[in-house]
Image (cartoon, rainbow, N blue to C red):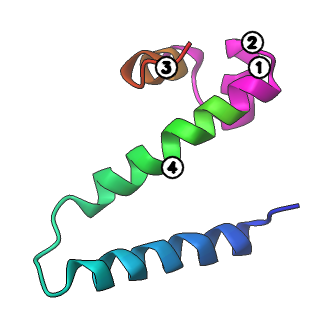
């Protein structure tokens, strides 16, 4: 089972790799990039585990159902 500490390590490693790959270039919009990269698969996975039930998925995520619906629409998820 993945825990919070493991998720932290994965994110840290990915961001460190991102900076290394920039090779001196100035980063821009890192926060939005990371949120987009993490949020979409998070929502997809939770929706799958809630068998597509948006009310349950919103509860699992700690979001308002309408907020989840906006995110589903924004990420063009089914």
Q: Nearer the viewer, mark 1 or mark 2?
A: 2
Question: Along the horizontal axis of the image, is 76 left or right of 61?
Answer: left
Horizontal relation, residue 47 to residue 73: left or right:
right
Residue 61: percent from left, percent from top: 67, 36
Q: Secondary structure at mark 2?
A: loop
Please identify the quadrant where the C terminus is shown.
Answer: top right
Mark 3 → mark 2, Cα distance in angstroms: 12 Å
Q: Residues within 10 Å of mark 2 (few under 14, many from 20)?
A: few
In this rendering, which labeled residue sits more in front, label 1 or label 4?
Answer: 4
Dot 2 or dot 4: first in sequence order is 4
| Residue 27 drawn at (x, y percent) | 17, 71
Residue 56 is tagged as 1
Instruction: Locate the N terminus by quadrant.
Output: bottom right
Contact, CB < 8 Å: mark 1 with mark 2?
Answer: yes
- Mark 4 sits on what residue? 38
Look at 66% across and 67% down and name the residue there: 7
Residue pointed to by mark 3: 72
Say which of 55 and 18 sits in front: 18
**Secondary structure of the residue carrying numbered label 3:** helix
Q: Residue furthest left?
A: 26
Look at the image and give the residue range highlighted in magenta.
Answer: 46-66
CA gap between label 1 and label 3 equals 14 Å
The x and y percentages for residue 38 are: 51, 49
Of pointers 1 and 4, the one earlier in the residue sequence: 4
Mark seen at residue 53:
2
Q: Quadrant of residue 70?
A: top left
Disc 4 or 3, which lies upstream in sequence?
4
**Mark 2 or mark 4, which is nearer to you?**
4
In the image, 32 versus 15, the foreground residue is 15
CA distance for labels 1 and 4? 20 Å
């Amino acid at each position: 089972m993945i825990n919070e500490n493991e998720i932290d390590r994965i994110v840290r490693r990915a961001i460190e790799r991102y900076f290394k790959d920039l090779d001196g270039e100035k980063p821009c919009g890192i926060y939005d990039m990371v949120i987009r990269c993490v949020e979409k698969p998070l929502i997809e996975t939770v929706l799958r585990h809630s068998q597509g039930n948006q009310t349950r998925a919103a509860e699992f995520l700690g979001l308002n159902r309408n907020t989840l619906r906006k995110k589903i629409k924004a990420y063009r998820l089914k």
